[in-house]
Image (cartoon, helix red, strand yellow):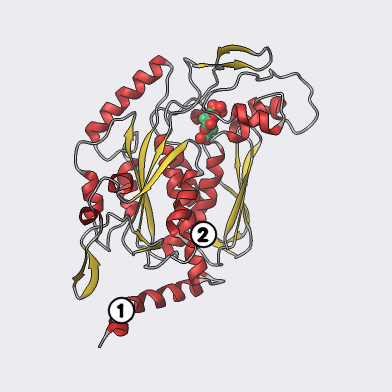
Amino acid sequence: MIRFLTAGESHGKALSTIIEGFPSNIPVKNEYINIHLARRQMGYGRGLRMKIETDKAEILSGIRFQKTLGSPISILIHNKDWENWTEIMTADEKLTEPEKITIPRPGHADLVGVTKYNFDDIRNSIDRSSARETAARVAACSIARRFLEELGITIGSFVESIGGIFPKNNYREELFLNTDTEFNAWELSQKADESQVRVLDITQEEKIIRKIKTAKKKGDTLGGTFYTIASGMPIGLGSFVHYDTKLNAEIAHSIMSINAVKGIEIGTGFESADMFGSQSHDEINIKNGKISRKSNRAGGIEGGMSTGLPLIVRAAMKPIATLMTPINTVDLSIMEETEARRERSDFVAVPACAVIAESMLAWTISSFILKKFGGDSLEETKENFNNYNSKINERLIINFKK
Ligand code: EPS
Protein backbone atom coordinates (compact mmCIF):
# COMPACT_ATOMS: atom_id res chain seq x y z
CA MET A 1 0.00 0.00 0.00
CA ILE A 2 1.47 3.32 -1.03
CA ARG A 3 -0.10 6.59 -0.07
CA PHE A 4 0.69 10.26 -0.03
CA LEU A 5 -0.74 13.38 1.48
CA THR A 6 -0.09 16.93 0.43
CA ALA A 7 -0.47 20.02 2.58
CA GLY A 8 -0.11 23.70 1.92
CA GLU A 9 -1.95 26.78 0.76
CA SER A 10 -1.07 28.51 -2.51
CA HIS A 11 0.23 31.62 -0.72
CA GLY A 12 1.25 29.94 2.50
CA LYS A 13 4.82 29.40 3.59
CA ALA A 14 5.34 26.10 1.76
CA LEU A 15 3.77 23.02 0.25
CA SER A 16 4.67 19.69 1.73
CA THR A 17 4.05 16.04 1.10
CA ILE A 18 4.56 12.76 2.92
CA ILE A 19 4.95 9.65 0.79
CA GLU A 20 4.74 6.22 2.29
CA GLY A 21 5.06 2.59 1.26
CA PHE A 22 7.83 2.55 -1.34
CA PRO A 23 10.54 -0.10 -1.02
CA SER A 24 14.07 0.82 0.00
CA ASN A 25 16.98 1.40 -2.36
CA ILE A 26 15.16 3.29 -5.13
CA PRO A 27 17.74 5.76 -6.44
CA VAL A 28 16.24 9.27 -6.24
CA LYS A 29 18.22 12.45 -6.77
CA ASN A 30 16.91 15.79 -5.68
CA GLU A 31 17.56 17.14 -9.19
CA TYR A 32 15.31 14.45 -10.62
CA ILE A 33 12.34 15.78 -8.63
CA ASN A 34 13.27 19.33 -9.60
CA ILE A 35 13.28 18.48 -13.31
CA HIS A 36 9.64 17.38 -13.10
CA LEU A 37 8.72 20.34 -10.90
CA ALA A 38 10.18 22.64 -13.55
CA ARG A 39 8.30 20.81 -16.31
CA ARG A 40 5.07 21.46 -14.42
CA GLN A 41 5.79 25.18 -14.43
CA MET A 42 6.20 25.36 -18.19
CA GLY A 43 3.82 26.40 -20.89
CA TYR A 44 2.93 29.51 -22.83
CA GLY A 45 -0.06 31.19 -21.18
CA ARG A 46 0.91 30.78 -17.53
CA GLY A 47 0.37 33.80 -15.27
CA LEU A 48 2.80 36.04 -13.40
CA ARG A 49 3.05 33.67 -10.44
CA MET A 50 5.19 31.28 -12.46
CA LYS A 51 7.74 34.09 -12.88
CA ILE A 52 7.99 34.38 -9.10
CA GLU A 53 8.33 30.68 -8.32
CA THR A 54 11.14 28.27 -9.21
CA ASP A 55 9.91 25.17 -7.46
CA LYS A 56 12.60 23.15 -5.73
CA ALA A 57 12.20 20.07 -3.58
CA GLU A 58 13.76 20.00 -0.16
CA ILE A 59 13.90 16.39 0.99
CA LEU A 60 13.39 16.20 4.74
CA SER A 61 13.33 12.46 5.34
CA GLY A 62 13.18 8.95 3.92
CA ILE A 63 16.12 9.30 1.52
CA ARG A 64 19.79 8.80 2.41
CA PHE A 65 22.69 9.11 -0.01
CA GLN A 66 20.18 9.44 -2.85
CA LYS A 67 18.35 6.18 -2.12
CA THR A 68 14.99 5.56 -0.45
CA LEU A 69 15.12 4.04 3.03
CA GLY A 70 11.67 2.45 3.01
CA SER A 71 10.61 4.98 5.66
CA PRO A 72 8.20 7.88 5.05
CA ILE A 73 9.63 10.39 2.61
CA SER A 74 8.80 14.01 3.28
CA ILE A 75 9.39 16.83 0.84
CA LEU A 76 9.00 20.58 1.19
CA ILE A 77 8.54 23.12 -1.59
CA HIS A 78 8.83 26.72 -0.44
CA ASN A 79 6.45 29.32 -1.85
CA LYS A 80 8.59 32.29 -2.80
CA ASP A 81 5.44 34.40 -3.00
CA TRP A 82 4.91 33.81 0.72
CA GLU A 83 6.94 36.92 1.56
CA ASN A 84 4.20 38.99 -0.10
CA TRP A 85 1.48 37.20 1.84
CA THR A 86 2.88 36.70 5.35
CA GLU A 87 0.32 38.96 7.03
CA ILE A 88 -2.58 37.75 4.90
CA MET A 89 -1.88 34.04 5.30
CA THR A 90 -0.28 33.91 8.73
CA ALA A 91 -1.11 31.04 11.08
CA ASP A 92 -0.60 33.45 13.96
CA GLU A 93 -2.77 36.24 15.28
CA LYS A 94 -4.40 38.58 12.76
CA LEU A 95 -2.51 41.87 13.01
CA THR A 96 -3.95 43.61 9.94
CA GLU A 97 -7.39 43.50 8.36
CA PRO A 98 -6.79 41.96 4.92
CA GLU A 99 -9.37 42.44 2.17
CA LYS A 100 -12.19 39.95 2.61
CA ILE A 101 -13.06 38.20 -0.63
CA THR A 102 -16.83 38.00 -1.01
CA ILE A 103 -17.31 37.56 -4.78
CA PRO A 104 -17.07 33.92 -5.93
CA ARG A 105 -15.71 33.04 -9.37
CA PRO A 106 -17.99 30.74 -11.36
CA GLY A 107 -16.15 27.52 -12.18
CA HIS A 108 -13.81 27.67 -9.20
CA ALA A 109 -14.25 26.08 -5.77
CA ASP A 110 -15.13 29.51 -4.28
CA LEU A 111 -18.90 29.37 -3.78
CA VAL A 112 -19.37 25.77 -2.71
CA GLY A 113 -16.14 26.00 -0.70
CA VAL A 114 -17.27 28.88 1.52
CA THR A 115 -20.78 27.45 1.84
CA LYS A 116 -19.58 24.03 2.86
CA TYR A 117 -16.81 25.14 5.25
CA ASN A 118 -18.84 27.98 6.77
CA PHE A 119 -16.37 30.77 5.89
CA ASP A 120 -16.96 34.50 5.54
CA ASP A 121 -13.86 35.00 3.35
CA ILE A 122 -13.38 33.20 0.04
CA ARG A 123 -9.58 33.46 0.52
CA ASN A 124 -9.95 30.52 2.92
CA SER A 125 -11.00 28.21 0.11
CA ILE A 126 -9.16 29.84 -2.80
CA ASP A 127 -5.79 29.07 -1.38
CA ARG A 128 -6.14 25.34 -0.93
CA SER A 129 -8.31 24.74 -3.98
CA SER A 130 -5.63 26.43 -6.11
CA ALA A 131 -3.76 24.19 -8.54
CA ARG A 132 -0.59 25.21 -6.73
CA GLU A 133 -1.20 22.04 -4.71
CA THR A 134 -0.24 20.00 -7.76
CA ALA A 135 3.42 21.00 -7.31
CA ALA A 136 3.43 18.83 -4.17
CA ARG A 137 1.79 16.02 -6.12
CA VAL A 138 4.45 16.14 -8.80
CA ALA A 139 7.15 15.96 -6.11
CA ALA A 140 5.45 12.99 -4.42
CA CYS A 141 4.83 11.16 -7.67
CA SER A 142 8.46 11.64 -8.78
CA ILE A 143 9.29 8.82 -6.37
CA ALA A 144 6.73 6.63 -8.16
CA ARG A 145 8.05 7.63 -11.56
CA ARG A 146 11.65 6.84 -10.57
CA PHE A 147 10.54 3.49 -9.14
CA LEU A 148 8.77 2.60 -12.39
CA GLU A 149 11.82 3.55 -14.45
CA GLU A 150 13.76 0.93 -12.51
CA LEU A 151 11.28 -1.62 -13.86
CA GLY A 152 11.47 -0.29 -17.41
CA ILE A 153 8.12 1.51 -17.27
CA THR A 154 8.16 5.07 -18.54
CA ILE A 155 5.47 7.74 -18.70
CA GLY A 156 5.01 10.51 -21.20
CA SER A 157 2.44 13.02 -22.31
CA PHE A 158 1.67 15.57 -24.96
CA VAL A 159 -0.96 18.22 -25.46
CA GLU A 160 -3.46 17.26 -28.13
CA SER A 161 -5.43 20.51 -28.33
CA ILE A 162 -5.84 23.91 -26.76
CA GLY A 163 -8.93 25.99 -27.47
CA GLY A 164 -10.15 23.43 -30.02
CA ILE A 165 -7.00 23.55 -32.18
CA PHE A 166 -6.04 19.96 -32.98
CA PRO A 167 -3.15 18.56 -35.04
CA LYS A 168 -3.91 17.91 -38.70
CA ASN A 169 -2.19 14.52 -39.04
CA ASN A 170 -3.72 11.20 -38.01
CA TYR A 171 -1.83 10.98 -34.73
CA ARG A 172 -4.68 9.05 -33.09
CA GLU A 173 -4.48 6.23 -35.59
CA GLU A 174 -0.70 6.19 -35.07
CA LEU A 175 -1.17 5.83 -31.32
CA PHE A 176 -3.71 3.06 -31.61
CA LEU A 177 -1.73 1.07 -34.17
CA ASN A 178 1.40 1.15 -32.09
CA THR A 179 1.97 -2.34 -30.67
CA ASP A 180 5.73 -1.94 -30.42
CA THR A 181 6.87 -3.38 -27.10
CA GLU A 182 10.11 -1.35 -27.32
CA PHE A 183 8.16 1.94 -27.45
CA ASN A 184 9.32 4.44 -24.83
CA ALA A 185 6.62 6.90 -23.75
CA TRP A 186 9.11 9.26 -22.06
CA GLU A 187 10.52 10.08 -25.51
CA LEU A 188 7.12 11.55 -26.38
CA SER A 189 7.38 13.88 -23.42
CA GLN A 190 10.88 14.94 -24.33
CA LYS A 191 9.64 15.94 -27.77
CA ALA A 192 6.58 17.70 -26.32
CA ASP A 193 8.78 19.58 -23.83
CA GLU A 194 10.51 21.28 -26.78
CA SER A 195 7.25 23.02 -27.62
CA GLN A 196 6.02 26.06 -25.68
CA VAL A 197 2.61 24.42 -25.40
CA ARG A 198 3.82 20.78 -25.33
CA VAL A 199 2.35 19.82 -28.70
CA LEU A 200 4.09 17.52 -31.19
CA ASP A 201 3.12 19.48 -34.29
CA ILE A 202 4.91 22.79 -34.88
CA THR A 203 2.24 24.33 -37.17
CA GLN A 204 -0.35 23.56 -34.55
CA GLU A 205 1.85 25.29 -31.97
CA GLU A 206 1.78 28.57 -33.93
CA LYS A 207 -2.01 28.48 -34.18
CA ILE A 208 -2.41 27.70 -30.51
CA ILE A 209 -0.12 30.52 -29.43
CA ARG A 210 -2.12 32.91 -31.60
CA LYS A 211 -5.31 31.72 -29.96
CA ILE A 212 -3.84 32.12 -26.46
CA LYS A 213 -2.77 35.66 -27.35
CA THR A 214 -6.34 36.41 -28.46
CA ALA A 215 -7.73 34.95 -25.25
CA LYS A 216 -5.30 37.04 -23.18
CA LYS A 217 -6.21 40.21 -25.05
CA LYS A 218 -9.88 39.53 -24.37
CA GLY A 219 -9.21 38.76 -20.71
CA ASP A 220 -10.36 35.21 -21.36
CA THR A 221 -8.96 31.72 -20.74
CA LEU A 222 -8.73 28.37 -22.55
CA GLY A 223 -8.73 24.66 -21.84
CA GLY A 224 -7.72 21.68 -23.89
CA THR A 225 -7.05 17.97 -24.17
CA PHE A 226 -3.93 15.90 -23.66
CA TYR A 227 -2.64 12.34 -23.78
CA THR A 228 -0.77 10.57 -21.02
CA ILE A 229 0.90 7.32 -21.99
CA ALA A 230 2.77 4.60 -20.13
CA SER A 231 5.05 2.10 -21.86
CA GLY A 232 6.79 -1.04 -20.66
CA MET A 233 3.66 -2.21 -18.86
CA PRO A 234 3.51 -5.77 -17.56
CA ILE A 235 0.52 -7.94 -18.45
CA GLY A 236 -2.17 -8.26 -15.80
CA LEU A 237 -2.01 -5.24 -13.49
CA GLY A 238 -5.48 -4.83 -12.01
CA SER A 239 -8.22 -7.41 -12.06
CA PHE A 240 -11.67 -8.18 -13.40
CA VAL A 241 -12.96 -9.55 -10.12
CA HIS A 242 -14.06 -6.38 -8.29
CA TYR A 243 -15.07 -2.81 -9.10
CA ASP A 244 -12.24 -1.51 -6.96
CA THR A 245 -9.52 -3.73 -8.38
CA LYS A 246 -9.87 -2.53 -11.96
CA LEU A 247 -6.87 -0.60 -13.26
CA ASN A 248 -8.97 1.62 -15.57
CA ALA A 249 -11.20 2.69 -12.66
CA GLU A 250 -8.23 3.75 -10.54
CA ILE A 251 -6.65 5.61 -13.45
CA ALA A 252 -9.88 7.52 -14.00
CA HIS A 253 -9.90 8.36 -10.29
CA SER A 254 -6.36 9.70 -10.25
CA ILE A 255 -6.66 11.73 -13.46
CA MET A 256 -10.09 13.13 -12.58
CA SER A 257 -8.66 14.29 -9.24
CA ILE A 258 -6.52 16.88 -11.03
CA ASN A 259 -7.87 20.42 -10.82
CA ALA A 260 -10.07 21.40 -13.80
CA VAL A 261 -10.08 17.97 -15.45
CA LYS A 262 -13.61 17.28 -16.67
CA GLY A 263 -13.25 14.20 -18.83
CA ILE A 264 -11.15 11.12 -19.39
CA GLU A 265 -11.04 8.31 -21.90
CA ILE A 266 -8.89 5.21 -22.26
CA GLY A 267 -7.93 4.07 -25.72
CA THR A 268 -10.48 5.09 -28.35
CA GLY A 269 -12.86 5.88 -25.47
CA PHE A 270 -15.85 7.92 -26.58
CA GLU A 271 -15.13 7.32 -30.26
CA SER A 272 -15.46 3.56 -29.74
CA ALA A 273 -19.12 4.08 -28.83
CA ASP A 274 -19.75 5.00 -32.48
CA MET A 275 -17.79 2.11 -34.03
CA PHE A 276 -18.77 -1.40 -35.04
CA GLY A 277 -17.29 -3.99 -32.71
CA SER A 278 -15.22 -5.26 -35.60
CA GLN A 279 -13.57 -1.84 -35.93
CA SER A 280 -13.15 -1.29 -32.24
CA HIS A 281 -11.50 -4.39 -30.77
CA ASP A 282 -7.86 -5.37 -31.12
CA GLU A 283 -7.34 -8.57 -33.09
CA ILE A 284 -5.11 -11.15 -31.45
CA ASN A 285 -2.33 -12.57 -33.59
CA ILE A 286 1.08 -14.25 -33.38
CA LYS A 287 4.22 -12.15 -33.82
CA ASN A 288 7.68 -13.73 -33.59
CA GLY A 289 6.11 -16.80 -32.04
CA LYS A 290 4.39 -14.79 -29.33
CA ILE A 291 0.79 -13.78 -28.75
CA SER A 292 0.39 -10.21 -29.93
CA ARG A 293 -2.17 -7.63 -31.10
CA LYS A 294 -2.78 -5.90 -34.38
CA SER A 295 -3.77 -2.66 -32.68
CA ASN A 296 -4.19 -1.04 -29.27
CA ARG A 297 -7.55 0.71 -29.44
CA ALA A 298 -8.26 -0.62 -25.96
CA GLY A 299 -5.51 1.72 -24.75
CA GLY A 300 -3.67 -1.05 -22.96
CA ILE A 301 -6.54 -2.24 -20.76
CA GLU A 302 -8.98 -5.12 -21.22
CA GLY A 303 -11.27 -6.39 -18.47
CA GLY A 304 -9.80 -3.88 -16.02
CA MET A 305 -6.30 -5.36 -16.52
CA SER A 306 -3.23 -4.13 -18.35
CA THR A 307 -2.63 -5.96 -21.64
CA GLY A 308 1.08 -5.14 -21.74
CA LEU A 309 0.59 -2.62 -24.55
CA PRO A 310 1.00 1.11 -23.90
CA LEU A 311 -1.58 2.64 -21.58
CA ILE A 312 -3.24 5.45 -23.50
CA VAL A 313 -5.16 7.95 -21.43
CA ARG A 314 -6.74 11.08 -22.85
CA ALA A 315 -8.18 13.81 -20.67
CA ALA A 316 -9.95 17.15 -21.05
CA MET A 317 -9.24 20.24 -18.99
CA LYS A 318 -11.82 23.00 -18.78
CA PRO A 319 -10.74 26.65 -19.23
CA ILE A 320 -9.21 28.34 -16.17
CA ALA A 321 -11.99 29.77 -14.00
CA THR A 322 -10.40 33.15 -13.22
CA LEU A 323 -11.23 35.62 -15.99
CA MET A 324 -9.77 39.08 -16.44
CA THR A 325 -12.98 40.01 -18.29
CA PRO A 326 -15.23 38.36 -15.76
CA ILE A 327 -18.64 36.77 -16.14
CA ASN A 328 -21.45 37.40 -13.70
CA THR A 329 -21.77 36.25 -10.14
CA VAL A 330 -23.08 37.52 -6.82
CA ASP A 331 -21.34 39.63 -4.18
CA LEU A 332 -22.20 37.60 -1.09
CA SER A 333 -21.61 40.54 1.29
CA ILE A 334 -24.42 42.63 -0.25
CA MET A 335 -26.34 39.86 -2.07
CA GLU A 336 -26.23 41.72 -5.35
CA GLU A 337 -25.36 40.51 -8.81
CA THR A 338 -21.99 41.73 -10.01
CA GLU A 339 -18.95 40.76 -12.08
CA ALA A 340 -16.62 38.09 -10.72
CA ARG A 341 -13.46 39.26 -9.01
CA ARG A 342 -10.25 39.55 -11.00
CA GLU A 343 -7.45 37.57 -9.43
CA ARG A 344 -3.97 36.91 -10.81
CA SER A 345 -4.05 33.57 -12.60
CA ASP A 346 -3.01 31.53 -15.61
CA PHE A 347 -4.67 31.92 -19.01
CA VAL A 348 -3.93 28.34 -20.01
CA ALA A 349 -2.48 25.49 -17.96
CA VAL A 350 -3.05 22.47 -20.21
CA PRO A 351 0.72 21.79 -20.70
CA ALA A 352 1.17 21.73 -16.91
CA CYS A 353 -1.93 19.58 -16.48
CA ALA A 354 -0.42 16.95 -18.80
CA VAL A 355 2.72 16.80 -16.63
CA ILE A 356 0.58 16.44 -13.51
CA ALA A 357 -1.33 13.63 -15.23
CA GLU A 358 1.98 11.86 -15.97
CA SER A 359 2.70 12.07 -12.26
CA MET A 360 -0.69 10.76 -11.18
CA LEU A 361 -0.52 7.93 -13.70
CA ALA A 362 2.93 6.98 -12.36
CA TRP A 363 1.42 6.88 -8.89
CA THR A 364 -1.50 4.66 -9.87
CA ILE A 365 0.67 2.21 -11.80
CA SER A 366 3.15 2.03 -8.91
CA SER A 367 0.35 1.25 -6.53
CA PHE A 368 -0.81 -1.67 -8.69
CA ILE A 369 2.77 -2.89 -9.18
CA LEU A 370 3.41 -2.98 -5.45
CA LYS A 371 0.09 -4.70 -4.78
CA LYS A 372 1.00 -7.43 -7.26
CA PHE A 373 4.74 -7.79 -6.73
CA GLY A 374 5.31 -6.48 -3.18
CA GLY A 375 8.85 -6.14 -1.88
CA ASP A 376 10.54 -4.31 0.98
CA SER A 377 13.53 -3.45 -1.16
CA LEU A 378 13.75 -2.50 -4.82
CA GLU A 379 15.83 -5.64 -5.42
CA GLU A 380 13.03 -7.82 -4.07
CA THR A 381 10.34 -6.07 -6.15
CA LYS A 382 12.53 -6.29 -9.25
CA GLU A 383 13.14 -9.98 -8.74
CA ASN A 384 9.42 -10.71 -8.38
CA PHE A 385 8.61 -8.49 -11.36
CA ASN A 386 11.25 -10.01 -13.64
CA ASN A 387 10.42 -13.53 -12.57
CA TYR A 388 6.74 -13.02 -13.45
CA ASN A 389 7.53 -11.32 -16.76
CA SER A 390 9.98 -13.98 -17.85
CA LYS A 391 7.37 -16.70 -17.39
CA ILE A 392 4.29 -14.90 -18.63
CA ASN A 393 4.69 -15.75 -22.30
CA GLU A 394 5.37 -19.40 -21.70
CA ARG A 395 2.36 -19.64 -19.40
CA LEU A 396 -0.18 -19.68 -22.22
CA ILE A 397 1.81 -22.14 -24.27
CA ILE A 398 2.25 -24.53 -21.34
CA ASN A 399 -1.35 -24.27 -20.13
CA PHE A 400 -2.97 -24.74 -23.51
CA LYS A 401 -0.60 -27.34 -24.99
CA LYS A 402 -2.47 -30.49 -25.97
C1 EPS B 1 -4.19 29.37 -9.49
C2 EPS B 1 -3.91 30.73 -9.57
C3 EPS B 1 -2.55 31.23 -9.84
C4 EPS B 1 -1.76 30.15 -10.53
C5 EPS B 1 -1.84 28.94 -9.65
C6 EPS B 1 -3.19 28.35 -9.74
O1 EPS B 1 -1.85 31.51 -8.67
P1 EPS B 1 -1.78 32.99 -8.08
O2 EPS B 1 -3.14 33.24 -7.52
O3 EPS B 1 -0.72 32.96 -7.03
O4 EPS B 1 -1.42 33.88 -9.22
O5 EPS B 1 -0.44 30.55 -10.78
O6 EPS B 1 -0.92 27.96 -10.01
C7 EPS B 1 0.21 27.89 -9.29
C8 EPS B 1 0.57 28.74 -8.35
C9 EPS B 1 1.02 26.74 -9.66
O7 EPS B 1 2.09 26.55 -9.03
O8 EPS B 1 0.60 26.03 -10.57
C10 EPS B 1 -5.52 28.90 -9.12
O9 EPS B 1 -6.35 29.72 -8.71
O10 EPS B 1 -5.81 27.69 -9.22
Q: Give the camera-side residue of 304 and 171.
A: 304
Q: Does the residue tagged 1 have its C-beta within 8 Å of any atom of ligand 1?
A: no
Question: Which tag is nearer the camera, tag 1 or tag 2?
Answer: 2
Q: Give the camera-side residue of 96 and 106.
A: 106
Q: Which residue: 48% across, 35% down? A: 260
Specify the amino acid type for callout 2.
Answer: Asp
Rendered location of residue 125, percent (x, y): 64, 31
Residue that label 1 marks: 396
* Above-or-below relation of 238 to 30: below
Q: Can residue 53 be spotted in the picture?
A: no
Can you tell which mark lies on residue 320?
none
Q: Which residue: 38% across, 61% down? A: 153
Q: Which residue: 35% across, 24% down? A: 212
Residue that label 2 marks: 244
The residue sitting at the bottom extreme is 402
Label 1 CA crowd tier, 10 Å (few <14, some 14–19, many 20+): few
Give the alpha-carbon distance from disc 1 to disc 2, as whole Å: 27 Å
Image quarter in which the C terminus is found:
bottom left
Image quarter in which the N terminus is found:
bottom right
Specify the amino acid type for callout 1.
Answer: Leu
56 relative position to 331: left or right: left
178 relative position to 209: left or right: left
Nearest to N terminus: mark 1 or mark 2: 2
